[in-house]
Image (tube, rainbow, N blue to C red):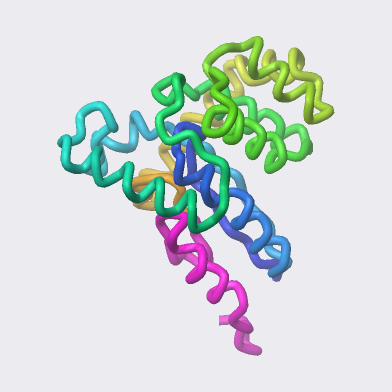
Amino acid sequence: MPKTVEYFYTHASPWAYLGTVRFHDIAEAAGAEIVYRPVSLRKIFPVSGGVTLAKRAEQRKRYRMFELRRWRDHLGVELIMEPKHETANDETANRMVIAADRQGLDAGRLSNAILRAIWAEERNIADETTLIAIADHQGIDGRGLLDAAKSNETAKVFETYTKEGLERQVFGAPTYIYKEEPFWGQDRLEFLERALALKRPENGV
């Protein structure tokens, strides 16, 4: 059986951005398939005890900036820690990735481009024209993909993924699930990599 990692995340997360290239590299090296599950943290947080950034205590927001700076410098990843469009609604972007995945397109490549757009390029991923341009640059029909993303069918899939995240006890992004074991946060990628490297017993259990 091929290795499979379920990837619950949202493009509004700087942590998903910081981990995305490493995660894809780890999965590729392990021969693992990524199952993309963009979700709505706006619906997950109230149920899981999470709090949106705007509602967090000042000391938590202050510490978050230290952590972002540390990881940016440690990884050597370009990151704007407080981008202009940080709080932009990313639902359409999430749904575009879902639509791309369901069409058999390279959802990972598109997702990485969207993450980079908000966290390294100061672009507004709530703007449809921007999303079309991002997809076009990846060799995808941006207008066609946007239309698919706005369909009722894709909206239902997005809702289903969010409900699935809640059922799987996801509470933040990014969350990687391998063999029913969750790994929350890009700082747990080393543990995910170790788990993927473990050989399965001969009986498959």
Residue 176, x across and y down, in percent: 50, 56
129 over 2 or under it: above or below: above
Q: Quadrant of the N terminus?
A: bottom right
Q: Is residue 47 left or right of residue 200?
A: left
**Nearest the camera: 80 or 91?**
80
Residue 4, x across and y down, in percent: 63, 61
Residue 131, x across and y down, in percent: 65, 19
Q: How many marks?
A: 0
Residue at the limit of the structure toward the bottom, as seen here: 202
Which residue occupies 57% across, 12% down?
A: 127
Q: Is residue 68 left or right of residue 179?
A: left
The magenta stretch spans which residues? 176-205
Q: Is residue 181 left or right of residue 65?
A: right
121 over 184 or under it: above or below: above
Residue 80 magenta-highlighted: no
Q: Is residue 74 left or right of residue 170?
A: right
183 over 152 or under it: above or below: below
Which residue occupies 51% across, 69% down?
A: 190
Residue 117, x across and y down, in percent: 60, 28
Which residue occupies 40% across, 47% down?
A: 69
Snapshot quadrant of residue 102:
top right
Residue at the limit of the structure toward the right, as seen here: 139
**Nearest the camera: 93 or 36?**
93
Residue 182 magenta-highlighted: yes
Q: Quadrant of the C terminus?
A: bottom right
Which residue occupies 42% across, 35% down?
A: 81
